[in-house]
Amino acid sequence: MTTQQLRQERPFLWLGIMSASSKSVPQQLALRARMRAILAQRMMLEFRKDLDLLLGIFIYLSWANYQLPQRLSLCLFMQLANSLVFDLGLNRSHTYDHLTPFGPHLCPSVPTSGPRTMEERRAVLGCYYLSSMISINLKRIDSLMDNPYGRLSNRISKTSRMRIRHNTRATSSMPVDQREGLSIGKAR
């Protein structure tokens, strides 16, 4: 994926990467302020929920120890990330029935498009990791992955990593002329 494709497909994530990679402190601060404004607009005023926002928050949190003066901000942004995981239904199997006591007109179900993608599974695991690190740092309890689906996602991710390692070893031992026709598809 090129930077232009990333900017088009995941603009909030791209903004987070630009903020974290900037060498100019004033530019970092301006980009982070812009991220906070966009996040507030999209989540609180437009009620948007998407993977782009979640991944952008991960970047924001990952660099927070360098750029955030208040520990309170860590909790706030971590809770926003947790909220997105739950609102997107990423903490549950795609077959979970999104029933709600409020009815579909007040709380519409999260649309599902088949089994979870590896990107979605990794996002849940990333959220768990960041949440755990922040919880340890602030001496607070984390319970995001303390459910059967969280443990299942972790096992599936480990299995996928082992399969990728195996395929990489097998491919690297092939002659170069045989490797050229191979392509890696999206893992699910």
Image (cartoon, rainbow, N blue to C red):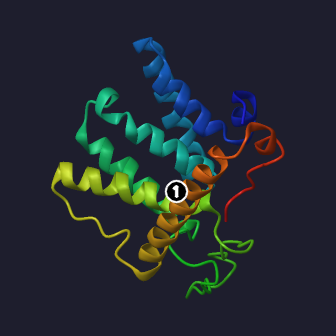
* Residue depicted at x 62% and y 87%: 97
| Label total for image | 1
Q: Quadrant of the C terminus?
A: bottom right
Depth check: give the residue in front, 107 or 50. Answer: 50
Residue 167 point in image, percent of width and height: 62, 56
Residue 162 point in image, percent of width and height: 51, 61
Residue 14 point in image, percent of width and height: 61, 33
Residue 45 visible (yes or no) = no
Location of residue 166 (image quadrant): bottom right
Q: Is residue 66 above or below residue 12?
A: above
* Residue depicted at x 65% and y 64%: 117
Q: Is residue 145 above or below residue 35?
A: below
Q: Say what amino acid the circle numbered 1 marks.
A: Ala
* Residue depicted at x 31% and y 45%: 74
Depth check: give the residue in front, 149 or 176. Answer: 176
Q: What residue would you read off at disc 1?
A: 123
* Residue depicted at x 66% and y 49%: 171
Residue 44 point in image, percent of width and height: 54, 52
Location of residue 72 (image quadrant): top left
Label 1 Cα neighbours within 10 Å, binned few <14 / some 14-19 / many ≥20: many
Residue 188 visible (yes or no) = yes
Q: Is residue 70 above or below residue 128?
A: above
Left or right of 49, for residue 175: right
Left or right of 2, for residue 60: left
Instruction: Give the residue furthest to the left.
Output: 139
Left or right of 36, for residue 89: right
Find numbered disc 1 in the image and state the secondary structure of the residue it sits on: helix
Q: Quadrant of the N terminus?
A: top right
